[in-house]
Amino acid sequence: MKATKPKIIALLIGILVIGTTSLYIAKFLAKSSGKSSLKSLVSTGIELFEKERYKDAVKKLEDCYQKAPEGDLKNQALLYISRCYGAQDEHEKAAEFWGKVVENPAMATHHAEAFYSLASLRSAGGTPDDMQAAEEYYRKAADVGSGSRFGHLAEIGIAKLMLDKGNIRGARLILEKLQDEKKDYPQLRNATFKLHMKLLFSPILTKVPESQQYAVKEGDTLDGIARTFGTTADLLEESNGVNPLRLQIGKKLKVVTGKFSLKVSKSKNILQLVGGDMAFNEYRIGTGKFGSTPAGRFTIAEKQKEPPWFRDGRVIPYGHPENVLGTRWMGFESPDGESGPTADGLGIHGTDDESSIGKESSEGCIRLLNRDVEELYKIVPIGTEVLVEE
């Protein structure tokens, strides 16, 4: 029996519908599979980033970034690509991708992080133009991220730039505000240490450490004033900007009368300068190999600039390649004032070997980078207490 014309038409329509539906289903499945594949790339990239395998992470993330359409997946890949390059100190690439984050309105919630990261990259350059650009980026980050973590970090960055310019008052207002708000960031701690040192080496009177004004009298010398008040001539000279050979009678000097002590952590390889009951500054140090730096209480008994080194009956002069003492030496004695077995030959000294800092590297002494030991030498007088802890 022959099919009627209406039945043939219905059959053709059915075939067309089934074909079209199949095509849409195939496209949908292909799209879903592609999206799933891109999600997998991003997820794997983030996992690798968190494991600090940044190069492997970038490969996955950039693959997704190139293939993904505009939207959340592409933006997520962009964010982590930027973080990866920043973590690897690839400044040009990091700046390029953070710039793309800033230009993307859909990523507004990450603009504070992007501006902060761009500021950090520029500040690493060190030139006046870099510093100006860094300040501008920090201010943008503080503005768009007000109240957020990156907003706070940007404020800290601004404060540090202020300190570099000598604007102690402006930096102090920012940092003390964040401290009053109980913010707890390593960057805030480090910036606060920097503020402490700027204040210490300035004529500004402080409560911690306690300081006062002293009017120079006839016959005064910086060494004599330092002995009277238990401080150092170096600190008097630097904080007041005076020439020790040309002291003017009647000139008012800032004199630090508060006492410092030193606290050494062998396990962390950190030396803290303690003022009153608070950490005033921190320095990374090297300690004795195989735990040979003895724990205990000591006092600084001697100080010497450009010290010779006495080893195996020989005197190795300062500047000789075999002299490991660097530019400064501060020798210890036991608290009773008598040099004992634990204090004999023990002290703090400098080094220009940065690779030896942050680990057990010395013959038993505590070593700092030369620039750090020179700073510490100016501050602590003979008699300063030193606590060495495991």
Image (cartoon, rainbow, N blue to C red):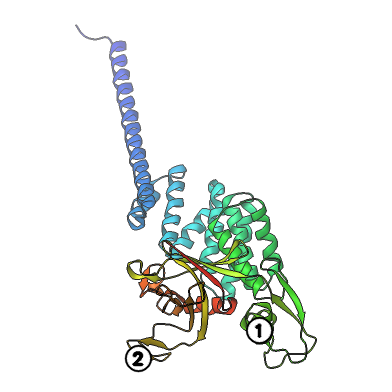
Q: SS at mark 2?
A: strand
User: Which residue extends farthest top?
Assistant: 1
Q: Earlier in the sequence, mark 1 or mark 2?
A: 1
Q: Nearer the viewer, residue 367 or 114?
A: 367
Circle 1 or circle 2, nearest the eye: 2
- On the image, the x and y values in percent for residue 22 come to 30, 26
Percent position (x, y) of residue 195? 63, 67
Could you tell me if the residues under marks 1 and 2 are in contact, i.e. CB atoms within 8 Å?
Answer: no
Q: Label 1 amino acid?
A: Glu
**In the image, what residue type sits under mark 2?**
Arg
Q: Is residue 20 visible?
A: yes
In the foreground, 114 or 66: 114
Do we see residue 161 in this rendering?
no
| Horizontal arrangement in the rendering, residue 335 relative to residue 345 (left or right) | right
Percent coordinates x, y for residue 70 in the rendering: 46, 45
Outermost right residue: 250
Residue found 58% across the figure and 79% down from its top: 378
- Answer few, some or many: residues within 10 Å of disc 1's Cα (few below 14, many 20 plus, some between 14 and 19): some
Along the viewing direction, whichever of 317 and 15 lies nearer the viewer:
317
Q: Residue at x 33, y 28 (%)?
A: 25
> In the rendering, at what x and y percent does residue 253 appear?
74, 80
Tell me the tag on residue 363: none
* Depicted 72 relative to depicted 29: above or below: below
Lateral position of residue 217 relative to residue 363, left or right: right
**Secondary structure of residue under mark 1:** helix
Label 1: which residue?
237
Residue 314 bears which disc, if any? 2
Q: In the rendered image, which quarter is residue 236 located in?
A: bottom right
Locate residue 37: give its quadrant: top left
Q: Quadrant of the C terminus?
A: bottom left
Camera-side residue of 49 and 159: 159
